[in-house]
Amino acid sequence: MTRPQYEATDEPVSPALLFDRDGRMDVIHDLAVTNELLDTADEVHEAFDGLGRPLQASGPAGKVAFHLTADGPAAAKIRARVRYYYATYASRHPTGIPPQETDLAAFVFAVANDEVVE
């Protein structure tokens, strides 16, 4: 499966990688259903959109949404968060190694679609 190419936009692009304070990762494949998946914005410590840009969760309970906090990607930060997650929580992953795509959008897409069992 290949990831469609996206041009930079002012809106977050799916999928999103979400990290809690302990470094656990969750994926929202379609940001349009964020309200259905998150009860409160406090559940998210750090998040990145499909282009690797930092996101902030906000809004009241039941109406959580994401907005961009920077125009550009945070490549080193997102790769570090994913490496930590795989090293710490993905012990039952076949390789224990995150995807190795060099293109950041392709990397996020591959991570979002990698089946990790904790």
Image: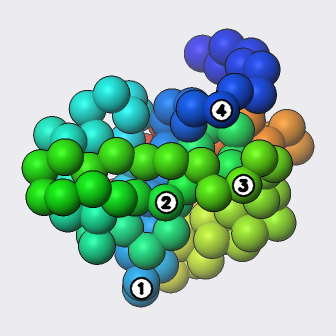
Q: Which of 65 and 47 is in front in this view?
A: 65
- Give the residue type that dot 2 points to: Gln
Alpha-carbon distance for marks 2 and 4?
A: 14 Å
Judge whether residue 29 can be spotted in this image: yes
Alpha-carbon distance for marks 3 and 4?
A: 10 Å
Q: Is mark 4 on a helix, strand or loop?
A: loop
- Give the residue type that dot 1 points to: Asp
Q: In this view, does 15 lie above or below 92?
A: above
Label at residue 70: 3
> Which tag, 2 or 4, sits closer to the chain's start?
4
Alpha-carbon distance for marks 2 and 1?
A: 17 Å
Residue 70 is situated, as x and y percent measured from the top left of the image, at: 72, 55
Within 10 Å of the Cα at label 4, are there few (<14), some (14-19), or many (20+) other Cα atoms?
Answer: few
Q: What element carries label 2?
A: strand
Residue on which disc 1 sits: 22
- Nearest to viewer (mark 1 / mark 3): 3
Q: What element carries label 3?
A: loop
Q: Nearer the viewer, residue 11 or 94?
A: 11
Within 10 Å of the Cα at label 1, are there few (<14), some (14-19), or many (20+) other Cα atoms?
Answer: few
Question: Is the residue under label 1 in contact with that under label 2 (CB below 8 Å)?
Answer: no
Within 10 Å of the Cα at label 2, are there few (<14), some (14-19), or many (20+) other Cα atoms?
Answer: some
Residue 2 is situated, as x and y percent measured from the top left of the image, at: 66, 16
